[in-house]
Amino acid sequence: MIKINYKIQFVLFAICLFFIGLGIFQMIDQGLKTDVDVFWQISHFVPFIMGAIIFGANIFTKRIEKFR
């Protein structure tokens, strides 16, 4: 498994949060669409949500390991 530096993970986590916020802002601005269009509207920032969960979990577990 590749180990990524803590600071790099935090930067990637911040970038993911930025794009999630940008996607939510765009959804609020355009309004929520219906049927298949809502899938395409949400699918653009789903990878950033998954990335934020992964990087956030890695950062959180590293923080717990430091205190042990």
Image (tube, rainbow, N blue to C red):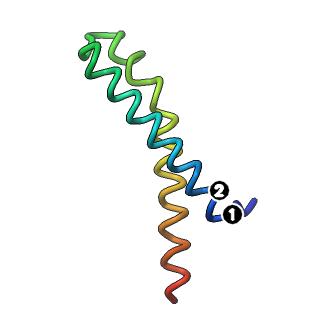
Q: Residue at x 47, y 67 (%)?
A: 60
* Residue named by callout 1: 5
Q: Going 33% across and 29% down the picture, which residue do you hit? A: 24
Question: Does 1 sit left or right of 22 as displayed?
Answer: right
Task: Give the position of the N terminus as an image quadrant.
Answer: bottom right
Q: Secondary structure at mark 2?
A: helix
Residue 29: horizontal and vertical position, in percent?
A: 28, 17
In the image, what residue type sits under mark 1?
Answer: Asn
Above or below for 38 versus 5: above
Q: CA distance from mark 1 to mark 2?
A: 5 Å
Q: Amino acid at mark 2?
A: Ile
Q: Nearer the viewer, residue 60 or 14?
A: 14
Residue at position x 44%, y 43% in the image: 17
Question: In the displayed structure, would residue 41 be above or below residue 19?
Answer: above
Residue 6's spot in the image, x, y percent?
A: 62, 65
> In the image, which disc is placed on residue 61?
none
**Position of residue 22 in the picture relative to residue 29 (left or right):** right
Q: Are marks 1 and 2 in contact (CB under 8 Å)?
A: yes
Q: Residues within 10 Å of mark 1 (few under 14, many from 20)?
A: few
Task: Kindly identify which residue carries mark 2.
Answer: 8
Image coordinates for residue 53, horizontal then vertical, percent? 46, 51
User: Is residue 14 depicted above or below 41 in this figure?
Assistant: below
How many residues crowd mark 2 within 10 Å: few (<14), some (14–19), many (20+)? few
What secondary structure is found at the residue carrying circle 1?
A: loop
Q: Residue furthest bottom?
A: 68
